[in-house]
Image: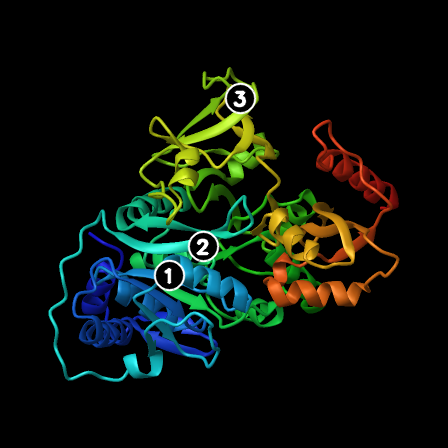
Amino acid sequence: MIIGDTIKHTAATFPEKIAIHCDGADLSYQDFQQLILTIQQNVLFKLENPIKKRIAMHVQNDATFLATFLALTGIGAIAIPLDPKWSDLEVDHILNDCKPDLIIRNDIREFSATYPTAYLEDLIKHSHITVNIPVVGEDSLFYIGYTSGTTGKPKGYLRTHNSWYESFNGSNQVFNLSASEVISSPGPLVHSHFLYAAIHALHIGATLHITKKFQARMVYEQLCTSNITTLYLVPTMFQALTEQFEELQQTLSLNRVISAGAKWQPHLKKRAATIMPNADVFEFYGASELSFVSVLDPEANEVNPESVGRPFPGVEVSIKKGDQTEALPNEIGRLYVRSPHLFSGYLNQPEATKEVFYNGWATVGDIGYVDEEGFITLVGRDKNKLITGGLNVYPEEVEQVLSSLDEIHEVIVIGLPDDYWGEKLVAILSWRTSKQLTEEQLKQHCKTHLATYKCPRQFIGVPSFPYTSSGKIARRLVMEQFQQRETQRM
């Protein structure tokens, strides 16, 4: 079976059941499946043979996004969601990297890169043309997502139907999900965590709640007044929801919360017990390339809250030392994963793909250890990857943008602990000349070239940097100095 097959069954068996609720509007499974079929027929009429065709999506965050995604993947095409938060330069880079056969859009934003375009409003119009839908194999590629690479440029990661289908089975087992659930996935669907949550909810025949834009007050009120049982989020979102609780003083009747992107700080876990006393909190660790790796469930949290839990069903974990031999329990090394959930490689980057795979195992460079009871603990992240608000940011990309300014001599971007963002981005810089730019000018320059979440929230000038023996800025030393300063300030 492929992604979306079970939706046809639900539409035929329970046609009036609500598939998607978005900002006050309901869509039944029957109508949702018809919308998928309509888009498929119109796309097939345009492309004739859609197998392996790359189709980019610049579509708003509502039911039409999911219908478009499932329509494309159901006819053998490869869906490539584009993030509206990306700058024009980022979008152009990605389009030129994936070279889509078609761009589906429902906005007026112009791209410098020119590719065939179809407007969603035309694709959702009822089609009297009937075109045979091709047979799609479960090992076919269906999705290219983009995540920042260690070079600072976004990398496309390739996914097959089967890699997600296997994850669905594991999710049902770990989270005990069924068709009776009402599941909220209130984040951006271009983010793989929320896209996976939405597609999985529809896969099991549950009712899905989404919103065009995450607004903490609106989401909290919806959680209070609806019968939502399961909430997907990242820690930053929960932090925003706690602020709504302080004002509304109304607890939530959720059964479970499924979180990704970063570990929860202890104070958030305490707040969760007050705000949603009946909810089990599941924190899972994974990556776009690896999918689920481990889950910290409520029982595991009682035993080893500092860990990221035990391996997800079907996942094998190996900690390897520098010589690729197996590490002993509690011995630190690089974390490798073997599972049916792995990605198929990076688009157009064979060398980067080789760095991930080793003898059937895959790694994204995270460093950690496994104890005698099988709990996985991460002690660091390879290279310098930062996580802010549940989103990955590589500082090299931000540094490159800031370094393009003539006034800046040298710059590094670090992450400092932050209760809300997990890590806040801070740019440490030295000036080339006596002429210094204002913080507002620096922020505006970043916003022109980067997605908002990649822009530093603080800029600090220094007269000079410490260096390593090879002449590079001693990044770790600088980070430790500023983390210590931040701790003393707090």
Query: Which residue is more in the foreground, 180 or 373?
Result: 373
**Picture residue at 34% right of the left edge, 45% below the top:** 167
Q: Which residue is mark 3?
A: 371
Inter-mark Cα distance, 3 to 1: 39 Å
Mark 1 or mark 3, which is nearer the start of the sequence?
A: 1
**Picture residue at 75% right of the left edge, 47% below the top:** 410
Q: Which residue is mark 1?
A: 80
Inter-mark Cα distance, 3 to 2: 33 Å
**Residue 279 percent location from the top left of the image:** 53, 51
Identity, as a three-letter code, of the amino acid under mark 2: Tyr
**Picture residue at 13% right of the left edge, 58% below the top:** 135
Image marks 2 and 1: residues in contact by CB distance under 8 Å: yes
Q: Nearer the viewer, mark 3 or mark 1?
A: 1
Q: Is residue 352 left or right of residue 274?
A: left
Q: Is residue 227 visible?
A: yes
Secondary element at image label 2 = strand
- Callout 1: 10 Å neighbours few (<14), some, many (20+)? many
- Against 238, residue 59 (above or below) is below
Q: Which residue is mark 2?
A: 146
**Residue 280 percent location from the top left of the image:** 51, 47
Query: Which residue is more in the foreground, 415 or 185?
Result: 415
- Against 428, residue 122 (above or below) is below
**Residue 289 percent location from the top left of the image:** 42, 43
Mark 2 or mark 3, which is nearer the start of the sequence?
A: 2
Secondary element at image label 3 = loop
